[in-house]
Image: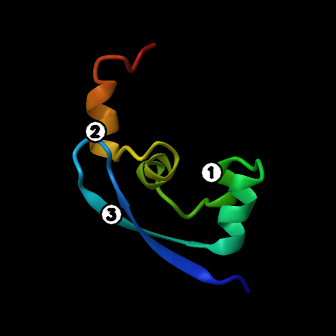
Amino acid sequence: MSKQVCMVLRCIVCDSSQWVRFEIDQYDRWQNGEFIQDAMPHLTVAERELLISKICGDCFDQMYKGHEDE
């Protein structure tokens, strides 16, 4: 079993922080090219986005508000 990590991630837009928990091997798989949703299926869409872009779900939604149909 892989070691679990609990990270505090901070949004670069609003400076809010959130704890995200995953296993080291999941992170390694993602960094080695596996899609994050396959490597870390237990994370929410917002948690995965925070890992990828450093932008929280609320800020991401605000940035793309009105572009849902595009």
Q: Position of residue 42 (x, y in %)?
A: 55, 64
Q: Position of residue 10 (x, y in %)?
A: 33, 56
Looking at the rendered image, the quarter that the C terminus falls into is top left
Q: Residues within 10 Å of mark 2 (few under 14, many from 20)?
A: some
Q: Nearer the viewer, residue 12 or 3?
A: 12
| Residue at the image position 75 percent from the left and 50 percent from the top | 34
Amino acid under label 2? Cys
Circle 1 sits on which residue? 37
Looking at the rendered image, the quarter that the N terminus falls into is bottom right
| Residue at the image position 34 percent from the left and 36 percent from the top | 60
Amino acid under label 1? Gln
Q: Position of residue 49 (x, y in %)?
A: 47, 46
Q: Nearer the viewer, residue 32 or 59?
A: 32
First in sequence: mark 2 or mark 3?
3
First in sequence: mark 1 or mark 3?
3
Q: Residues within 10 Å of mark 3 (few under 14, many from 20)?
A: few
The color scheme shown is: rainbow
**What number is the disc on residue 59?**
2
Circle 3 sits on which residue? 18
Locate residue 36 relative to residue 5 in the image: left or right: right
Measured in 3D between alpha carbons, the distance from the residue under mark 2 to the one under mark 3, in whole angstroms, is 13 Å
Circles 1, 3 touching at the beta carbon (< 8 Å): no
Q: Nearer the viewer, residue 14 or 70?
A: 14
Amino acid under label 3? Gln
First in sequence: mark 2 or mark 1?
1
